[in-house]
Image (cartoon, grey):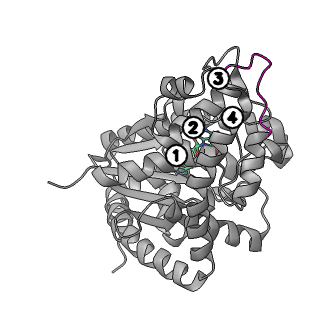
Amino acid sequence: MSKPRLYSGMQPSADSLQIGNYIGALMQWRDLQEAYDAFFSVVDLHALTQPNDPAELREKTRRTAAQYIAAGIEPSKSTLYVQSHVPAHAELSWILSTITGFGEAGRMTQFKDKSQRYGADATSVGLFTYPVLMAADILLYQADIVPVGDDQKQHVELTRDLAERFNSRYGTTFTVPMPVIQQDTARIYDLQNPTAKMSKSAESDAGVLWLLDDPAVSAKKVMRAVTDSEGSVRYDREEKPGVSNLLVIYAALTGRQIPSIEDEYAGRGYGDFKKGLAEVVVAEFGPVRERALALLSDPAELDRVLAANAARAEAVATRTLADVYDRVGLLRRA
Ligand code: AMP
Ligand code: TRP
């Protein structure tokens, strides 16, 4: 029996991923790639909805792909590719846009937030149709599950609605995917502002642990992380967001349970605890960084791996697209 399909992706929106991406997404992807026929894309077409310098976008795309691989996504096991390398994404997106309601797309909270922030003149049609392109990503591969963060759940719901609508209008064509929403315990907060999610676009660099940072820099950031004045290493999200966040990171990277870490540091100060965590962070990310930098030192080889994976993706995507074109009544080219 063939394995169920999985689809997920991330935007190439920074030179380095941060450890929230690693713990919240990549670690789960790495585990899931065993039981699923997994497709992981670097969604560069989506990234165009933000202003980008062209040379930088190319570089960020390579870097994001290298970090997927360095974190343990295996390009021989999973299909790891760049979205724009498979033209069917843009093509299916057009078809799906013709069955998406204007009001339906306008209800997407991410669009509402972003368009409000940018203002009407700086809001592109691409930002509006962003979720339709995301639906095309998922539906082209007949994905059964889509692991995403909470903020993307609504987009996967839209994807399900579009799949069901298309299927009922034109006959069963798409698998209706299930979102798999990341656990709360996998959410990482900013080290300096531990009630805000750690993010690539954080205001201050001091609160963000970058995957490609020098390990000594990351260790220093851990040592300077905001805590509280109580002095006991204890999980309490409400009262002790800083310490709780550090405990979550510690537990995620070591596979240990939070109470066992609390026990280990009982009666010891935050200094000891942070030193322990800094060691864990260096031990985990040192090798990831080395692997990513090694991959990036040979861009031609990396591009070759991405091309081979894109060919695999394209074979699946083209089949779905041809079926869709037939069903909606586009005349086949002779
Ligand atoms: P983004 O960088 O926001 O595009 O997110 C890419 C992926 O990383 C998504 O699956 C997010 O849910 C996940 N992610 C981003 N930031 C965090 C965080 N601070 N904690 C946990 N997961 C995160
Ligand atoms: N929109 C997603 C994000 O910002 C990225 C994404 C694009 C995606 N296409 C996808 C995620 C398909 C899952 C499946 O995180």
* Most foreground residue, 254 or 197: 254
- Which callout, 3 or 4, points at the residue further toward the start of the chain? 3
Disc 2: which residue: 250
Amino acid type at image mark 4: Asp
| Front tag of 2 and 3 | 3
Separation of residues labelled 1 and 3 (CA atoms): 26 Å
Segment tinted magenta in the rendering: 224-233
Residue matched to label 3: 233
Determine contact: label 4, label 2, CB under 8 Å. Answer: no
Give percent across and percent down for residue 177: 37, 41
The answer to whether one can see residue 97 in this image is no
- Tell me if label 1 and label 4 are in contact, CB under 8 Å: no
Cα–Cα span, label 3 and label 4: 10 Å
Residue highlighted by disc 4 = 272
| Residue at point 36%, 58% (across, down) | 324
Marks 4 and 2, how far apart at CA: 13 Å
Magenta stretch contains residue 232? yes
* Number of numbered callouts drawn: 4
| Element marked by disc 2 | helix
Q: Is mark 1 within 8 Å of ligand 1?
A: yes
Compared to residue 27, the image places residue 296 above or below, namely: below
